[in-house]
Structure formats: structure tokens, C-alpha cells
Image (cartoon, rainbow, N blue to C red):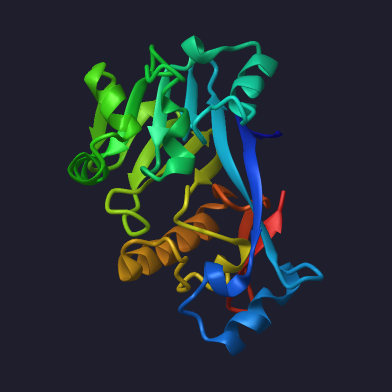
Amino acid sequence: MDDHPIGDIDVRVVINGRGTGRPEWMFPTVPHIDLSAAIAPHVDADGRISFVYSSVIVRTPDRVVLVDAGFAVTDRRADPLADALVDLGLDAADVDAVVITHGHADHVGGLVDRRRRPAFPRARHHIGAAELEHLLATEPSHEIVVVRAAGLVETVDQADWVVPGVRVLPAPGHTPGHIVVEVTSGHERALLVGDAVAHEVNIPEAAWNHFSDERDEPASSTRQRLVEYAAGGDHVLIASHMETVGRVRSVSGRHELSPV
């Protein structure tokens, strides 16, 4: 777990799992010569890149917001998110709001418990309107169906505040209704971009699409917009699959990620 204070708001990154893969698997449409040169600083001795699966707990002075709920909890899988809440002196009932950046399994599995009941029974669950429509039409057994049946879902179709200091912004492309989260306290800001940015190499190469981007061109343009926004606003940038948390800087006309 990694804490990143943003003014008087605490932002804690919770690692739910780790993985590795070949660069060409992650970025299948990028020409090999371009990919191998750009990815070289990030590969291990076997030529593989590493990545994480993460959620974020945001604690304002009087609210608790969870951004993405990680994998489904099973007898064979640990529950780092529950452990992180306990470490903070909290439990699932203390979560006031859940933001669902998008509906992929590693972001929503933890929305329900082992009995298929809402895991965060007091929380309002915020999801993009287009995302909810897409999931209801294509995945009738999706976790969001359970949460919606309990009357806990609120849809987002434009920038909107979840709680004071925490707002959601539309960022479609990776999925039809992908959203991101901006945390603001005083002059400090963080941008939690979900899967809109897949890997550290996406900072200088924001046009490169990830293998699971469902809408390639919108994903690319959204990613470029978010990287520019993070650089211009001096945000701390957090992405669901990037182990590096940092600020985007412009160096010789190219964007780079500087760890914090």
C-alpha cells in the first residue's frame, strides 16, 4: 500500500495483484521497432514488462471514497482491499461512495460479496451512464446488476462531484463509458485515470492503444487529453495498472513521468 496526501485528503493505492507480459501483447498494434525502443527501460531480463492491479481509497476529512473494487473475493484469493480498510480502522460499511471507472472484471469483482450481495451496502456507486447501458445490454450477470437492484447506483454523464474534493470526469475510449477521478485539496491535485493509461510508456507515447481498449481512436485521443491535463495541472497521476505514481513533466517537447 502506498499513501499520497493531497492537501488534507489521503489517497491510498491498494495493490490487488501483479502480472507480467510481453510488450507486444500489451501494445499489439505498435510497430515492433518503435515498441522495442520505447519499452526497453521497462523490460526485465526476459524481455517482459510488469504491471499491477490496483484500487484506491480516498479519505477526505469526513468521507471515504473507493475507486474500483478489484477482483472477486474467493477462498483462493486474498482480499487486500479489506485488509487496507482494516489497516485504516475502517470496514466496508464505512465507505460512503464507490466510483467504478469501468466494468472490467478486475475493477468490479469486489463490488459484491461471496453471497452476491453488495459489498459496500451504504455507498452510492457512481458509474458512467454509457458504461451502465453497455453492461446491462451485454452482461446480464455483471456485478453492477446486483448493486443496481439494491438501489445503490448513480450514473454519470458529465463532470460531477462525488463528495467535496472528489469529482468524476468522462473519459470514454477504453470502454464506452470509462470515467476518471480528480482529487483536489487547496492547490494540490491528483488524477486517478483507471485504465485510460495502461503503462508508464503511455506517458510519452499516449497515442499507443492497449490490447483491451474497446474503442481504439477515442481511447487514444482521451489518453492524450488526460496526459496533457495532468501535465498542465501538476497532478499526481495514478493509473490502475502502473506501479509508478508520479507527475507528468514536459521534457524537450515530450512528456515524462517523474515518480513522487
Q: Please tell me in which quadrant of the rendered image residue 111 appears.
A: top left
255 vs 148, nearest the viewer = 148
Residue 240 % position (x, y): 54, 47
Q: Examine the rendering and report whether any part of residue 124 can be seen.
A: yes
Tell me: 22 left or right of 142. right
Residue 34 % position (x, y): 58, 85
Tell me: 99 left or right of 155. right
| Residue at 47% across, 10% down | 93
Q: Please tell me in which quadrant of the rendered image residue 87 appears.
A: top right
Q: Furthest residue to the bottom?
A: 33
Tell me: 241 left or right of 119. right
Q: Furthest residue to the front?
A: 75
| Residue at 42% across, 61% down | 212
83 vs 112, nearest the viewer = 112
Q: Furthest residue to the right?
A: 45
Residue 256 % position (x, y): 64, 67
169 vs 70, nearest the viewer = 70
| Residue at 17% across, 44% down | 137
